[in-house]
Image (cartoon, helix red, strand yellow):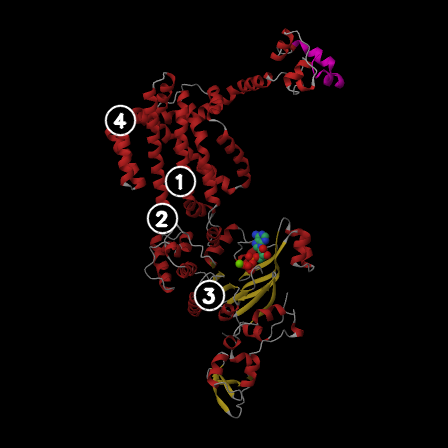
């Protein structure tokens, strides 16, 4: 997980607004002037879906959009392949505005550039697993004989050998979602959209699927947009984390940074009951220095989580570790800092809302 | 003299009434009775007549009587009938040909080809030995008592009409599922077709076509039986899981790919349920249509009623029940096989 800033922006979402209702254009100026979602509903009977969204999605990253139910996550991800038309704003893929595309260009985009995985799988119940996995190719007009090998390859890759002839309803939820992922992968599109792809699965299976996704991502380096309402999942997967509330972006950035410097009470609430020792990494709490301190108790890796360091220290709080990255020292970790970091941060007063759009 | 005189007097229309009095329709029954018994129209509030057309006509001869309404409708219909026939006749002519062809075909093919062919169809559709046995015994039984040709005529008519119902009903249902406006416009017509007693649509059809033409009963059957297949096609497509449609969109399917690859296959159980009902309703109508010269078992039922031939009436009734059960079980078996293939 290196910093995202040096990567190319694959998808740029700019000043995106979505208002649901009879005449969204008429109330757009009110929203731009700062009317709240509740007020808009109360006085004008329109639902504020998205409010001035600006997000850069970097190539090869997993960008996780997180928020409570109803915060606008599904609405936002459906703007990326324009399953929902925006009220105002732009969505650019490699610099081309998707909102301006005509029907043919849009179809090309959906067939070749983007694929999608759904919360409730949305497989075609009357087609076999193999046909489902090859659906993207079938839609493009690739004959069955040709897409079969491609579909089989991806079914194998997601761990589904020998079920190609079965129908989706014969598989468990976890297996169905593997078919959903194979279907998205076989389209060979550079962008993969995942709307709460693992939320309907049992916790253990969900963990498996997260590992599978990280595994695949290491190999394929796709641009993944992942929606989740589960912070643990978001922190596990995200290179870039976007937190939504009531249709606007409350804070976005590197997950560790959001954990250490939440800028909104909403986020503080959100992160208050996670296991910080497991999700925080050494690099987020260390002091950056190349000077070797005295009384070094040992060396820890830059990307280790705090839990593993605590285990090594056997609970002693007086120790100091050297932080290593690729065999070189990049910082120093004092156990006292580590313990302090385990206490949830109150929202940094000056940072409040500064990141909110 | 009449109760509602005052209405016309107060409106100052007396002149109009008397002026138009000459072309007033014949005296209504009430007036005639009142006149012959020599009594003045009673003024008691208990006897106050509803201000109907006839009552108003009593007061003002220029006011039309209610029989003018039915007469007007009839005259209007007769006036446009010819121009309607000019358009409708050629369009519906193929229906006559199809019915004639089917009837000719099924009666002039030897029984030892027709019966095995029917068995083969039943087997392919249902894959059920029990059903096949039942059909074999039923048809064999009807043939044994020399009701074979009547039963086959009924079957031929039903097959042609049900086929046309599906041919037109499914596309109409699809169009309804795609456009709310089309749906809003079609539903009242379907409601009307479904609630009108079947005898009622025979009336205008008899005026439009000659009773000897097969298309007369063909149209009556199709109008009556097409409703369920339209409704259930529309319903079936509208009920297709939205998330599956969304997935189809997300992978860039065209409307056509979506229709043939997703919506119709997933609506198929509902469409088949509609086809089943359509066939059953055609069967009900084909009996009534024997009034307008539809051949088949219905003719025998009619003979049983007209000549009080109890045995003929009962046996042909039983034949209709057997046909109904055969058709119902066969289409339901097909439906179950579709359901089994794509549940979930
Ligand atoms: N088609 C729609 N019409 C009206 N309101 C909608 C529609 N779709 C979503 N919304 C509203 O937009 C908000 C965001 O919904 P959604 O994107 O589904 O949230 P999430 O996926 O984060 O749970 C909700 O308040 C929801 O009620
Ligand atoms: Mg959602």
Helix, strand or loop under label 4: helix
- Residue at 49%, 50% (x, y): give it: B242
Which of the two labelled residues, at mark 4 and mark 2, occupies the earlier sequence position? 4
Quadrant in the rendering for residue B301: top left
Mark 2 belongs to which subunit? B
Please, which residue is most extreme toward the bottom here? A294
Mark 1 belongs to which subunit? B
Which of the two labelled residues, at mark 1 and mark 2, occupies the earlier sequence position? 1
Expressed as whole percent of the image width and height from the top left, the position of residue A151 reads 37, 58
Say which of B29 and B296 sits in front. Answer: B29
10 Å neighbourhood of mark 3: few (<14), some, or many (≥20)? Answer: many
Judge: label 3 CB < 8 Å from ligand 2: no
Q: Which residue is mark 1?
A: B272
The CA span between labels 4 and 3 is 71 Å
Q: Which residue is mark 4?
A: B143
Mark 4 belongs to which subunit? B
Q: Nearer the viewer, mark 4 or mark 2?
A: 4
Judge: label 2 CB < 8 Å from ligand 2: no
Helix, strand or loop under label 1: helix
10 Å neighbourhood of mark 4: few (<14), some, or many (≥20)? Answer: some
The CA span between labels 1 and 2 is 14 Å
Q: Which residue is mark 2?
A: B341
Q: Nearer the viewer, mark 1 or mark 4?
A: 4
Say which of A69 and B164 sits in front. Answer: A69
Q: Which mark is residue A222?
A: 3
Residue B321 in the magenta stretch? The answer is no
């Amino acid at each position: 997980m290196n910093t995202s800033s040096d990567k190319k922006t694959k998808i740029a979402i700019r000043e995106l607004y979505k208002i649901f209702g009879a005449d969204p254009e008429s109330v757009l100026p009110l929203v731009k002037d700062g009317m709240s979602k509740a007020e808009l509903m109360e006085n004008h009977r329109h639902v504020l879906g998205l409010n001035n969204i600006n997000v850069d999605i970097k190539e090869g990253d997993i960008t996780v959009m997180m928020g409570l139910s109803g915060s606008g996550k599904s609405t936002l991800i459906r703007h990326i392949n324009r399953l929902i038309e925006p009220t105002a704003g732009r969505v650019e893929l490699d610099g081309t505005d998707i909102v301006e595309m005509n029907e043919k260009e849009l179809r090309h985009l959906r067939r070749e550039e983007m694929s999608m995985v759904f919360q409730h799988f949305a497989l075609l119940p009357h087609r076999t697993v193999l046909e489902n996995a090859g659906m993207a190719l079938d839609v493009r007009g690739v004959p069955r004989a040709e897409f079969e090998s491609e579909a089989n390859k991806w079914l194998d890759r997601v761990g589904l050998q020998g079920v190609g002839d079965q129908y989706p309803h014969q598989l468990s939820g976890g297996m169905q979602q593997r078919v959903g992922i194979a279907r998205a992968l076989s389209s060979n599109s550079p962008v993969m959209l995942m709307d709460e792809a693992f939320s309907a699965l049992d916790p253990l299976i969900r963990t498996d699927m997260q590992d599978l996704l990280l595994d695949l991502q290491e190999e394929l380096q796709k641009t993944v947009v992942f929606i989740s309402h589960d912070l643990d999942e978001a922190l596990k997967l995200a290179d870039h984390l976007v937190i939504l509330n009531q249709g606007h972006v409350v804070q976005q950035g590197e997950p560790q940074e959001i954990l250490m410097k939440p800028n909104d009470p909403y986020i503080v609430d959100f992160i208050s009951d996670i296991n910080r020792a497991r999700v925080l990494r050494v690099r987020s709490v260390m002091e950056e220095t190349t000077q070797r301190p005295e009384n070094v108790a040992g060396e820890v890796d830059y990307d280790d989580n705090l839990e593993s360091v605590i285990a090594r220290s056997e609970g002693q709080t007086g120790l100091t570790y050297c932080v290593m990255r690729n065999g070189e020292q990049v910082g120093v970790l004092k156990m006292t800092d580590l313990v302090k970091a385990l206490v949830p941060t109150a929202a940094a007063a000056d940072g409040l809302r500064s990141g909110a759009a | 003299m009449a109760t509602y005189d005052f209405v016309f007097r107060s409106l100052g229309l007396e002149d109009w009434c008397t002026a138009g009095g000459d072309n007033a329709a014949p005296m209504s029954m009430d007036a005639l009775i009142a006149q012959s018994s020599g009594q003045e129209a009673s003024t008691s509030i208990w006897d106050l007549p509803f201000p109907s057309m006839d009552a108003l006509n009593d007061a003002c001869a220029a006011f039309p009587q209610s029989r003018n309404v039915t007469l007007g409708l009839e005259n209007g219909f007769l006036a446009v009938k010819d121009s309607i026939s000019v358009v409708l006749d050629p369009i519906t002519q193929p229906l006559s040909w199809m019915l004639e062809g089917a009837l000719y075909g099924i009666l002039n093919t030897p029984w030892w080809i027709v019966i095995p062919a029917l068995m083969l169809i039943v087997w392919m559709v249902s894959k059920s030995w029990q059903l096949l046995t039942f059909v074999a015994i039923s048809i064999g039984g009807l043939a044994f008592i020399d009701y074979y040709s009547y039963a086959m005529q009924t079957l031929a008519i039903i097959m042609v009409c049900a086929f046309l119902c599906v041919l037109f009903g499914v596309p109409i249902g699809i169009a309804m599922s795609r456009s709310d406006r089309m749906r809003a416009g079609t539903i009242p017509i379907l409601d009307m077709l479904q609630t009108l007693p079947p005898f009622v649509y025979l009336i205008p059809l008899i005026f439009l076509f000659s009773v000897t033409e097969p298309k007369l009963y063909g149209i009556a059957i199709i109008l009556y039986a097409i409703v369920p297949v339209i409704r259930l096609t529309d319903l079936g497509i509208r009920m297709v899981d939205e998330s599956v449609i969304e997935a189809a969109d997300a992978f860039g399917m065209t409307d056509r790919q979506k229709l043939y690859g997703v919506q119709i296959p997933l609506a198929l159980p509902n469409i088949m349920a509609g086809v089943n009902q359509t066939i059953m309703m055609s069967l009900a109508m084909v009996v009534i249509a024997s009034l307008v010269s539809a051949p088949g078992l219905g003719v025998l039922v009619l003979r049983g009623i007209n000549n009080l031939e109890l045995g003929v009436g009962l046996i042909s009734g039983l034949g209709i029940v057997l046909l109904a059960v055969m058709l119902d079980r066969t289409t339901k078996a097909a439906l179950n096989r579709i359901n089994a293939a794509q549940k979930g």
